[in-house]
Amino acid sequence: MHSLNRNRDGLPVGLLFSDSSPTAAVEATQAAATELAISEVNEAGGINGVPLVPVRVPVGPRPADYLRAAEALCDQFGVRTLFGTHMSNSRKAVLPLIEGRQALLFYPTLYEGFEFSKNCIYTGAAPNQNCLPIARHLLRHYGPRGYFIGNNYIYAHESNRIMRDLFEQADGEILGEDYLPIGASDAALAAVMAKLEQAQPDFIYSTVVGSDTIRLYQAFARTSLRARGVTIASLATNESDLARMGADVAEGCIAAAPYFATLDTPASRQFVAAMQARFGAEMPITSGAEAAYFQVHLFAAAARACGALTVEQVREALWGVTFDAPEGPVRLDAATHHSYLWPRVARAASDGQFQVLETAAEPVRPEPYMVEHCIEDRTPEDV
């Protein structure tokens, strides 16, 4: 058994988010939501009277920086429960250390799937929970001819591979596929826009992330495609991106995620109000933040159910707890370590907010390996 290292101050938990990475804007929302959830857990009595003690160290922009930060959290501060990382290359950089230190990493971000670690809990969307809904929506409402644009790293390549399979299964056609380095030049973006103008797709599927998202959408807004109603669809574009690109640029783009800040339910309204009361009215509320929030509460519920605060007992207890998250009730799948989530599709409106178009009728079982999936003959309620 490996202890979670309770000390005289409480139970240390690490926050592993960067304020200088390409995805720093959305990571800021995830860090804020993690802090909010920790404060709520402590206000409710902590873990059977033991408070959670958040520990955070500086994290640079590169995957190796996340690894060094995780090492410091584990070795200098005795942390055995970590919340964070965002891009897949940072998660993959950290996982060997997490496994070697017998720690737990709670990962609150959508990703490409096809991964399992007994020491990682995945609370962002798996491919069947976002790729399938957005592919069905694009086929129904935009057409079968797509063009893929991504950053040149693992998430984009793998997500595009999945989407290509889905569209070819439905007799769709992918007219082109381009990958840009993170921080691509204006000339590189312009070259891709020229290819789009020549290809004339029905839609663009973007796996561009972080600050490059803003520049991509701004470049696309100047094209004739945008003028005739072609849209950019993405799993990674979120409310922090909309806030930075502006409503005029964002309007009409399509996104798929388990949660959007405009979701009008009591739990969602309470979450948004608590985030803005604590961090200001300008704090964007993202799906990544919502996952970061509920994963802390799932951890706390599991830890409260344990006889001893060990990695093994908490991990086992996780499979028996649920939480009424802002998106709806969520729970974890013991077989995959992923989450049952509520897939949704939304469109950016003229006010710069996502408006939900489709919602799953019930939480969807995660299929990170896409063993069972079908893009055809399903209604929106079946997503």
Image: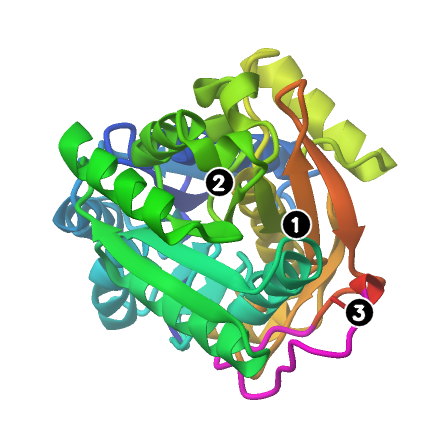
Amino acid type indicated by mark 3:
Asp
Give the label on residue 382, or none.
3
Mark 1 crowd level (few <14, some 14–19, many ≥20, 10 Å Cα): some
Residue where numbered disc 2 is placed: 237
Task: Quadrant for the N terminus, please.
Answer: bottom left
Where is residue 379, by image quadrant? Answer: bottom right
In the image, what residue occupies the spot 55% across and 18% down?
248
Q: Looking at the image, tell me whether mark 2 or mark 3 is earlier in sequence order.
A: 2
Q: Position of residue 106 (x, y in %)?
A: 46, 57
Amino acid type indicated by mark 2:
Thr
Q: Looking at the image, tell me whether mark 2 or mark 1 is earlier in sequence order.
A: 1
Amino acid type indicated by mark 1:
Asn
The scheme the figure's colours follow is rainbow
Residue 368, can we see it?
no
In the image, what residue occupies the spot 33% across and 48% down?
198
**Which residues are the magenta region?**
365-379
Residue where numbered disc 1 is placed: 48
Q: Is 144 above or below relative to 297? A: below
Question: Residue lying furthest bottom in this view?
Answer: 371
* Residue 368 part of the magenta segment: yes
